[in-house]
Amino acid sequence: MTDNTGKIGWVDMTVDNAGELCDFYAAVVGFKPQAVDMGDYSDFNMTMPGNGEAVAGICHSRGSNADLPPGWLAYFIVADIDASARACSDAGGKLLVEPRGVGGGRFCVIEDPAGAVAALYQE
């Protein structure tokens, strides 16, 4: 098994107008939006036009994403989400979203001491 610790495993964006931004990034980057059913609305995986691989997400500021700040969010892969969340706080950062399950793993959202926001993901 490959150790992916430290790798960026995913990027997504949480915004009020996800559908409009899908159209923007489809025109500018060439992504192909693929709807992801969230119950009463859809978020979007952005796929590569050549092979259909999902490489990013554009999400509505609803449900579990309601409290996330707008903008692109990188998900850094960590070995132990709970230990990394504690290390964030111990090193002067803030835990914005507590560790919780998603997509076969667990993630949390942190703010570093400079105010930059990122996510941590444990596979």
Image (cartoon, rainbow, N blue to C red):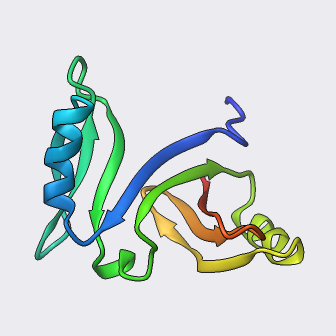
> Is 89 placed left or right of 99 in the picture?
right
- Is residue 36 at all visible to an observer of this figure? no
Residue closer to the observer: 16 or 42: 16
Relative to 78, 32 lies left or right = left
Q: Nearer the viewer, residue 4 or 61?
A: 61
- Residue 7: image location, x then y, percent: 65, 38
The x, y position of residue 94, in whole percent, is 72, 79
Residue at horizontal 22%, vertical 53%? 44
Q: Where does residue 25 sit, x and y in percent of width and height?
A: 24, 41
In the image: residue 23, left or right of residue 15: left
Q: Quick check: 8 above or below 79?
A: above
Q: Residue furthest right?
A: 90
Residue 96's spot in the image, x, y percent? 60, 79
Vertical arrangement, residue 53 with respect to residue 57, above or below: above
Say which residue appears at 43% left-offset and 82% top-offset: 67
Please count the marks in the image: 0
